[in-house]
Amino acid sequence: MTASTSGHPLSGRAAIVGIGETGYVRGADETVLEMVLGASMAAIRDAGLTPADIDGILPPPGFVAWDEIAAHLGIPDVRYTSTPQMGGASPTAALTTAMMAIASGVAETILVPIGWNGYSALRPRPDAKPSKRRFSAAFFETVRNYYGPYGLRSAPWWYSLYLQRYVELYDVPPEAPGAVAVAARKHAQLRPNALMHGRAMTMDDYLASPYITEPLRKFDCCVETDCAAAVVVTSAERARDLPHRPVLLLGGAEGHANPAHELTNRADVLDLGLSRAAPRAFEMAGVTARDMDFLQIYDCFTHVVLLQLEALGLAERGGAPDLVKGGALELGGAYPLNTAGGMLSQGHCWGLNLVVEAARQLRHDAGDAQVHGAELGLVTGYGDLGDGSIVILGRG
Amino acid sequence: MSTADKQIPRPAELDLEFFQAATSTGELHVQKCADCSDHHHPPRLYCPRCFSDRYVFEKVSGRGTVYSYTVSHFTTEKAWKDEVPWATIVVQLDEGPRLVGTARGIDPGAIRIGLPVRVVTETVTDDFAYLWVEADAGAEPEKTGNERAEEAR
Ligand SMILES: [Zn+2]
């Protein structure tokens, strides 16, 4: 049992009590809405509840709105809803919003869902039902005017604009991002629902993978998948009466680089939103990154994981390549990372799959991937042009 | 390399003012605060330094250095398939702001942080100017990070 020791009024007041996820596939049979509802219903049932118990919904930006979720699930009385506008950082940021809503009494039991057709939006199956779901965000205007004309159409090309500076200034060897990719792939072999289950990858495989846009190789990039996930959060008091061991929200924060809407004009382009969020979350929880039994880090790209390890305070700027040597990120190492394979090898579910896996670890229900005796862990989010979010979780 | 078939945007609002300052004169302009003289990009309605809402778009030389870059070896865009590998450069302008543009006449393998470069505009439509980044022949080459490290050894 990990109680909050920080004395912060939000710390330890809410808990994740239900988790749900679909498979991580390319070419789903279901629409995005069907996947989101399926994962949501699975999470509600896992919590031992029904939709009538849900009184708050914090959906992701872009794809599905709270009102259609409420209508289709038959949630009769929604007391609170809001949507973080932070791309992939949104689901983890929503957990902090849930802590605030629950601790203040605005809502008691909150659903945080996400899902998308990350693979099929661009490559629909011939027999697929028509779908109009497309992600859009305000920063797309920056992309259209200032990156798109130069052939920089999506995230790998945008982020490479600052990641190359990291690699050149700090002499980051390819084996460092490679260690992130290899650890994720190794862990995916322990999760049958991972897209890359059954497809092992060595460091030599990684080093042989072609560049997409330097410094990013093919195997530095996460896998586009169709998938959905959801979690249910309620008060720590109510959590005690529910079927699973509660997973307490001990700390949470978001942070944003300045300016947030454009990547290249920041005083320090390597300064992530997480650099600001992490100290706030650790202070709220009364712990440090070194107290964590595992790390679930938003792994859209391997180099972004290295920068987040530094933002968490585990290494100085440029120090992550040394930190990740010798299997440190693998199960049994000092910093077990993304124990279900992460977005690099399980599937890209906007990081909510990382939250689901963190909850499994803290329930001691992670099977062959279980970190023995896990009491504390963290999940980060990274979205749009570097927005950051983080939650610190404890076994209740 | 040319702008043919490339994705040409239709900017709006304040971004349009940035591009029209270039297309109407054929020369690069960036936003400058009319009160504190801070240059910034992309343009903003309030100055991030002094919060003034008074600004002008001022002609700049386009000279600067490579701040960061990427060499792209793969694309899903038809217009870029014949261009690989192409390089995109983030230029640190002498005036302060950074601009993104396509390298032209520079060997992608020779690009390093600190290399002197110059941003040149090409008017594509009334509302959009493409930004090219060329080697700045007139500048004394600044030592790259690697060369500085080499000397330190
Ligand atoms: Zn000013």
Image: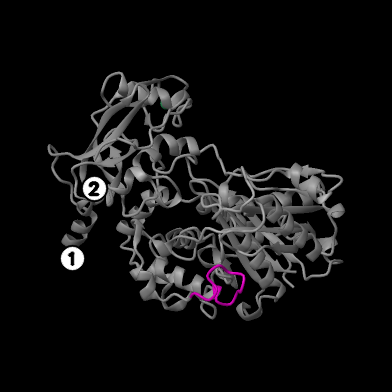
Residue A195, magenta (yes or no): yes
Q: Residue B114, labelled with which disc? A: 2
- Chain of the residue displaying label 1: B
Depth order, front residue of A226/A176: A226
Foreground: disc 1 or disc 2: 2
As measured in the structure, the alpha-carbon distance from the residue carrying label 1 to the one carrying label 2 is 20 Å
User: What span is colored magenta in the figure?
Assistant: A188-199
Q: Secondary structure at mark 1?
A: loop
Q: Please tell me which of labels 1 and 2 falls first in the chain.
A: 2
**In the rendered image of this protein, does residue A197 appear above or below residue A74?**
below
Colour mapping used in the image: one colour
Tag shown at residue A357: none
Residue A253 seen by the camera: yes
Q: Residues within 10 Å of mark 1 (few under 14, many from 20)?
A: few
Q: Quadrant of residue A265?
A: top left
Q: Residue at x 75, y 61 (%)?
A: A43
Residue drawn where x is 27% and y is 52% of the image = B85
Give x and y (percent) for residue A277: 56, 52
* Along the line of sight, the residue nearer the viewer: A205 or B69: A205
Q: Main secondary structure of the magenta part?
A: loop
Type of the residue with mark 1: Arg
Q: Which residue is mark 1?
A: B153
